[in-house]
Image (cartoon, grey):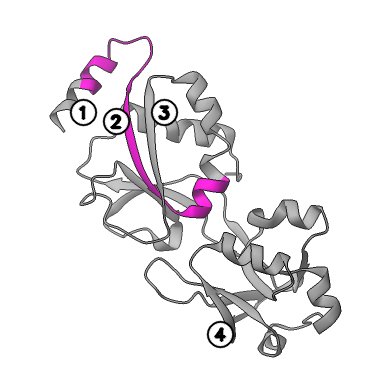
Amino acid sequence: QAIDGAIEQLNQFRDSPAGHIRLNVAVEAATLLLAPVLPVFAERYPDIELDIVASNRIVDVTEARFDAGIRYGGTVPEDMVAQRLSADVRWVVAASPEYLARFGEPRHPHDLQQHRCVSNRLGNSRIYKWEFERGEEQLTVKVPPLLTVDLAETGVVAILQGFGLMYLPEPLIAEHVSAGRLRLVLTDWASYGPGFYIYYSSRYQVPTGLRLLISLVREMKPLGL
């Protein structure tokens, strides 16, 4: 910490800031939010080293000596300072055209009970329930999971091969949908969940490198804001 403080003091006199930033980031945030801005960040700030640990397991970022964490808003620890980095995320249900041709398309969330489904395991080991809304109507469906994954990308590979249906953030599969490899179903029931937030201890002096990264994400808005 003393070394970090000395670097921060030097940054006040540098033309180009330097330092080391260590982040604990949800896997989807690393892929969708950070990856698009990293090349620009490296060009602007070549002397700032980023160490990104992508994991859906929730850890105490202070105890584990991370500078900050990035999670969906609903999973950020309450005792942390949090700043929004993205717009809310649309959650959708998707499957391959081959699966839908073979097993049919669900017309109502309750129809999911008759389908093969891929469920997500949260960082705290809970199974993610599928949430839907249409107008004033809201539903939470506990599907019968034939497969449970803790990395959404694993489930995406499975449904691309015709495994079944999966509930996941729309940006994660946008390219597959555009290319026709996946199809969205129950789109009139799609719901929005909290976007990504960066968080850190209120007792923590935010280093220059982290402030610059936050500013760049907000400038580029890879997931809207």
Mark with earlier residue (2, 4): 4
- Which residue matches tag 1? 4
What residue span does the magenta drawing correspond to?
A: 7-32
Mark with earlier residue (2, 1): 1
Task: Say few, some or many: other residues with alpha carbon within 10 Å of mark 2 (under 14 / 14 to 19 / 20 or more).
Answer: some
Tell me the distance, in whole angstroms, between the alpha carbons under discs 2 and 4: 42 Å
Task: Say few, some or many: other residues with alpha carbon within 10 Å of mark 4 (under 14 / 14 to 19 / 20 or more).
Answer: some
Tell me the distance, in whole angstroms, between the alpha carbons under discs 2 and 1: 8 Å
Residue at position x 24%, y 15% from top? 10
Callout 2: SS: loop
Callout 1: SS: helix
81 over 113 or under it: above or below: above
Task: Say few, some or many: other residues with alpha carbon within 10 Å of mark 1 (under 14 / 14 to 19 / 20 or more).
Answer: few
Badges 2 and 1: C-beta atoms under 8 Å apart? yes
Quarter of image, res 37: top right
Residue 104 placed where, x, y %? 83, 82
- Which residue matches tag 3? 212
Q: Of the residues shown, which amino acid type is indicated by label 3?
A: Leu
Quadrant that contains the N terminus? top left
Residue 136 placed where, x, y %? 66, 77
Work out whether residue 187 or residue 67 is closer to the camera in this orientation and state it. Answer: 67
Mark with earlier residue (2, 3): 2
